[in-house]
Image (cartoon, rainbow, N blue to C red):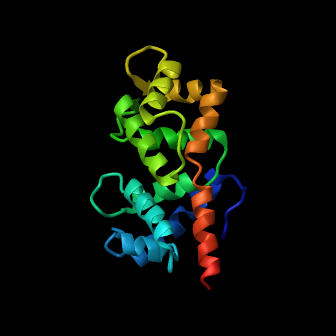
Amino acid sequence: MGNCSGSSVENLQACESHQWYRKFMTECPSGLLTFYEFKQFFGLRNLSDTSDAYVKTMFTTFDMNDDGFIDFMEYVAALSLVLKGGVQQKLRWYFKLYDIDGSGCIDRDELLLIIKSIRAINGIPNETSAEDFANMVFDSIDINGDGELSYEEFMEGIQKDEMLLKTLTESLDLSHIVQKIQGEMRGSK
C-alpha cells in the first residue's frame, strides 16, 4: 500500500482513506451511492434472494440519514463497521455509530435505533429484546444517571463489563454475512 507502514486497522484506514475516496468518487462521481451501485461497487452479483435481502438491509442501515443514498462518510462508516480492529478502535467506532446526532453523547433512543438496525442485519434471534438490552446498557454504564452516555462513560463502562463488551462485539460482528455473500459469489462463478 504505497508508503504505508504498520499494520493496525487505524494506520491502514489512514493510509487507505485517500485511495478509498478516489475509488468512491470514480465509481460514483455524484458522491451518492444507490443500492444498485452499492452492490456493483462491492462486486455483489448473482446473489440469492436471501443474500440480496441481507445486502439491502446493510445498505439501509448504512444510509444513516434515510435519503436512499450512501454518501462517502456513510460509506467509510460501513467499511469501519465491517473491518476488524482492536477493542479500542471498535469501541471508538461504536460510540460514533451510536451518536447519531453527533452531540457527543448517546441517548437511549439512539442506542435502541442502532441495536435494532444491527440485529436486522444479523438476522440472528436474540434472547434479550433490543429495548431490554438498551436498558441494561444504560443501567450498567450511565454513571451520573442523566440518561445520556458520554464518550468517557461509554468507553470505561463497556471495557469494565466483560459481558456487555462481548455482547456488543458479537452484535456488531458482520463477518458471517460477508462470508455467506462471498461463498455465494465463489459458488456462482
Q: Spot the residue most to the left.
A: 67
Q: Spot the residue most to the top.
A: 144
Answer with the quarter of the image where residue 61 lies.
bottom left
Question: Relative to the observer, which residue lies in front, 135 or 9?
Answer: 135
Name the quadrant of the C terminus: bottom right
Residue pictured at 38% horizontal, 74% vertical: 36
Question: Relative to the observer, which residue lies in front, 7 or 35?
Answer: 35
Residue 2 falls left or right of residue 140:
right
Residue 163 falls left or right of residue 62:
right
Answer with the quarter of the image where residue 112 lies.
top left
Percent of width and height locating residue 171: 56, 43
Percent of width and height locating residue 174: 57, 54
Percent of width and height locating residue 53: 44, 64
Residue pictured at 36% horizontal, 57% vertical: 63
Residue pictured at 42% horizontal, 43% vertical: 116
Residue 144 falls left or right of residue 178:
left
Name the quadrant of the N terminus: bottom right
- Location of residue 171 with respect to 42 vertically, above or below: above
- All told, the count of numbered labels is 0
- Location of residue 35 with respect to 126 vertically, above or below: below
Percent of width and height locating residue 20: 51, 67
